[in-house]
Amino acid sequence: MREGKVANRRLFSLLISIPIHWSPPIFHYRYASRTSPATLPGPALPKSLNIALSYRSQPRLRTTLPSQSCIYSPSRHVTFHHTNTLTQVGEVVSVSGSIKKQEGGKKKKKKHSSKKTVEKMEAGDTSLRNLRPNYFVGIQISNEDIHKALIQIQEDMVSYDESLFRALVDVATSHITLLVVHVDTEEALSLATSALAKCGKQLMDDLSACPLQLTFSGISHFGHQVVYAQLVEDDHYHRLLDLAEYVRNVFGEGQVFMPDKRTLHPHLTIAKLSKAPRMRGKHAPRKIDPSSYKQHLDIHLGCQTVTGLQLLAMNKSKDHNRYYYNSAQVMFDIKCKDNMDHTQCCFPRRPILKSQRRT
């Protein structure tokens, strides 16, 4: 009994001797004990303890030690769970609403449904800017002549610099991207599928009667990081831009979240360095040398007839033809003359490194 009174007197003297700094509306109190445990409302505090408390409506105390945890409740009771003597307890964070326990100061990412995501972006919520696209609306490039031309360009690039092999895009996945979307729930996928079906219904008559012909000619790059085949900017090219704008408007009206608002620059990717990040023990160039494809700058690759639109998944496994997982598609009433036998260009996968070739 006497020891408890002594401890209380020591605690009172310490609190009086320590200045209180006014930082509205928070008071910071600092307590330290080295000789004996002190008594506060709730369980006894362990020895050698440094703690800072913040008083607001419902503050939350967050520990930086992974082996200990501490929560401060509105009733001003402090609860400690410890295995050894605590030497430091982390910062105090004031929050509104219910009190939640977080260890290590880490915050869990919040998941947003599709409609709420669109509403928040329209309201200017900046917390959703980092949502990455995981689906896209694309046009498949399946013309065999275009594939063969792409393979030839890639083989020459690898012959010039074998380290570019990891940056090459699989020719079997050749496509043109019209827009990218973020789909996080089954409801969002249903909205995206419905929007694609609406596009197909509205575009069916026009694109079936007058098919879209995309001609690829010439090679260019984006900042020496991406090498791509260019589209000839003819009447069909401008029809493609109008098509992409219409699809974007339909997806926007359908409450499908589109994180990328940049102007469309349709292209056919040949190689990109983002596929070959710099790794320990493996060399990857910082840029793609134009000399690796200079002999193909004016190459004519071929013409692709647009037979439909597809909703493709970026993160799901490829199909048996190594093409993107097709979640939904709309096909136009067009008889395509493309040769679907790709054994001379895509199967087996090319190019093949010299070290991988059988002698």
Image (cartoon, rainbow, N blue to C red):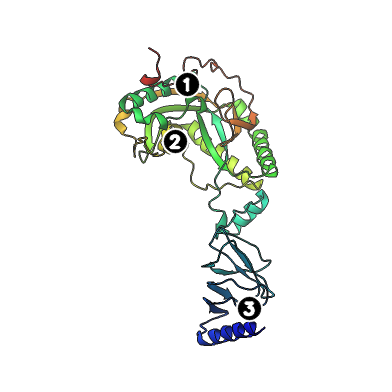
Residue 39: which disc? 3
> At 61% across and 26% down in the image, what residue appears?
209
Residue 332: which disc? none
- Looking at this view, is 8 or 235 the one in front? 8
Do tag 3 and tag 2 residues touch (Cβ < 8 Å)?
no
Q: Residue 357: horizontal and vertical position, in percent?
A: 40, 16
Do tag 3 and tag 1 residues touch (Cβ < 8 Å)?
no
Residue at image mark 2? 275
Q: Is residue 201 left or right of residue 243?
A: right
Q: Nearer the viewer, mark 3 or mark 2?
A: 3
Element marked by disc 2: helix
Element marked by disc 1: loop
Q: CA distance from mark 3 to mark 1?
A: 73 Å
Q: Quadrant of the C terminus?
A: top left
Do tag 1 and tag 2 residues touch (Cβ < 8 Å)?
no
Element marked by disc 3: loop
